[in-house]
Image: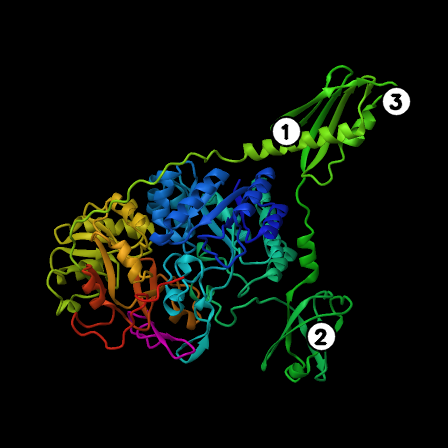
Amino acid sequence: MMECLSPAGNRESLERAVAAGADAVYLGCTRFSARAHAGNFDDAELTDALRFCHLHGVRVHVTVNTLVKDTELADVYDLLRFLSESRVDAVLVQDLGILRMIRHCFPGLNVHASTQMSLHNASGARWAASVGIRRVVLARECSLEEIRLAAQTGVEIEVFGHGAQCVCVSGQCLFSSMVGGRSGNRGTCAQPCRMQYRLRGEEKAWLSPRDVCLRDDLPAIAGAGAVSVKLEGRLKRPEYVATVTSSYRRGIDSLAAGRFVPSSPDEKQSLLQIFQRGGFMRGYAMGCEDAGVIDPERVNHGGVPIGSVARSDGRFARLAVTLPLHNGDQLRIETSRGDYETLYAGPEVTSGGEAVLRLRPEDGRKVRPGDRCVRLTDSLQIQQAMEIPLPRISVDLALRAVPDEPLTLTASDGERSVTVTGEPVQPARQRPLTADDAVQQLTKTGGTAFTVRHCSVVTDQAFVPVSRLNAIRRDVLDALAEARILDRSPDTQAFYPEDECILPDRAIPSAVIVRNASQLAGMPDRMRVIWQPETYTEDALTDGLPEFPDDLWLQLPVVCEEDTLQMLSRFVADHRDRIAGVVLGSVGQLGIPWNVPFAAGTGIPVMNRRAAQFLFEQGCAFVTASQELNREELRILMAGRPPILVPSYGRAQLMLLHHCPARTALGLTTGHADCRICDQRHPESLIGLTLTDRRGTEYPLQRCRLPEGCRVSLLNALPTDIRSDAAREGWEQLWTLTDETDCHHFPDHVTSAHWRRGVE
């Protein structure tokens, strides 16, 4: 049966997830979690959470899915040792240095590849299995067919099923980092994607995706081979976790029973009410594209329409309600003069009735007849979600109380049984223990996780005080609880010290990434040429290759479907006389035998020496330093002059978008793969477009055309330029040319990016 995997940002959300029927939860520690602003769990809280979940048969996946710096690796080791000793069910990772540490030092830990690792096709899944990763959380951009191909590799596949979706390909976002120093790759994203930007004169949230809801698509997801559906929400309220988990639990159970039941109208309404942006979409997995993905009108909770203003005098508004309204409901009246939020205080109003709202004096003039009203929170829904009882564990008890024999009580949950033995039983002098008396006392399990299903008693003129019955009941249930916790806790406790981190010291040349051959004019001697085509179709590659010198390296796209990756593999093999090597766009491309040298590009961030060591052990000729390191951190990484390139010039890719903002602005929801708007130089194409923020900063948009459709890069407003600094350090450099015409005319207005400031 497919796993229902629920978020747990804190203990209250954890309990709501278990109460609502989660098979597993994912949560973060207070260190190295990609949701640093969730409540998260310290060591003591995590230990208690593990015991609670394992008692109830729920698995616990712990996120250690941030990129880490060299100075943090010792703390990472300590955390992993704690998680190993605590017997967590799985650890989610992004950083390749952490992956290597787990495989070498904590081989018992079950590793899941976080979606931050940017694995998105079958080759990536095969690679993950080859390095000991048991489960891959696929990128949200995967189609149903890509999910199916990845699942056929045999690795477990987890798919995001509900909630907020990053607009950038996970693990590839530098926007928050570059504009504010808060790194999404380190759990502190400031969400610039939810801000307003100007596109062709319209100020809207062009980067804000709708929330995903795959509740009614569970049969398709399971049919594609996914073993787990992940529900987003570690930053959401406990009642959100309970409501969403309950819905998906019903769907999964009906699917397992062979008679899938889609969500009812009330269930759909419940999911919309608890939280949604844009009224939900079915996600890339089910074919959503462009304007179907993005809701540029509103970035916060859309709520549920509940009526409209019938009359208003500036002090009071009368609402004609279309749904029951409860005392304590939070409402938003949407007016042409701005939104007005208020809390309803009054008696329940039935559908078709009228409710009276007291208006604040400063806002009363906003509200006019006809204004739409939506409910943001339903007080009754919240109450019901918080009152879902925790599941009770059914047990059978068997008491033997016979004079001159030890008092024994056995408890069984159907899978395991435990027996507690006490002192010998005394014969009764007056009133002997009866079976009814014993059953009455033994079934008092309030305050525990257990409920007694059946209780049998063997006794014969025995005297057993009530206090002894209570004590042996407590002892046997405690013993059964410990047995359940131990049985459901994987044996992960073996650990080993770290080995020495040795990086190769072979010399490599600096390199320049270009989009066309004309940009090579003025290129310094001894620089390696890396071609990053605008179009990755076989015809375009064949036509463009002759323009470049021999010993060219080909930059692979960060994301592409399996068929495209296989086509690129064949193309490289057919042109080995011209192509000296490939630069991998994402780590999953290590799953392809390239038959030429290969290296790790900027899409495979190297923030620490352990990550570099891992990639060199995988066979990389060179790797690329993370663009989020400052000068002191780079000095640690580059000690000994390993074959690592330092990005020293170029517009950083802030986001890699799966949707096209130009098509979104046109309202297009289909035809992404076959779009030719840019090829035809259509006046409303992406060519020359920028997104402009509220400060007037312009961020260029640049397409990369793949057979399956374009991917769009959102580029930094200014190029990074630390060439002179990198030269003084003696490092080999990586330049990336986007709109530059050649290698010796660079703009005057540049940024040093993270050279001095670094990231949180």
Rounded to the nearest angstrom, the CA distance separating label 3 from label 1 is 34 Å
Rounded to the nearest angstrom, the CA distance separating label 2 from label 3 is 70 Å
Residue 476 percent across, percent down from the top left: 67, 29
Could one spot residue 209 in this view of the protein? yes
- Principal secondary structure, stretch drawn in magenta: loop
Q: Quick check: 702 left or right of 388?
A: left
First of labels 2, 3 by sequence position? 2
Q: Quick check: 247 left or right of 98?
A: right
Q: Residue 688 lies in magenta, yes or no?
A: yes
Rounded to the nearest angstrom, the CA distance separating label 2 from label 1 is 55 Å
Q: Amino acid at mark 2?
A: Leu
In terms of secondary structure, where does tag 3 sit? loop
Q: Which residue is mark 3?
A: 431
Q: Which residue is mark 2?
A: 319
Position of residue 60 relative to residue 433, above or below, is: below
Residue numbers of the magenta segment: 677-700
Q: Quick check: 713 left or right of 580?
A: right
Residue 414 badge: 1
Within-10-Å neighbours for mark 3: few <14, some 14–19, many 20+: few
* Front one among 592 and 67: 67
Q: Residue 548 lies in magenta, yes or no?
A: no
Q: Amino acid at mark 1?
A: Gly
Residue 745 percent across, percent down from the top left: 18, 74
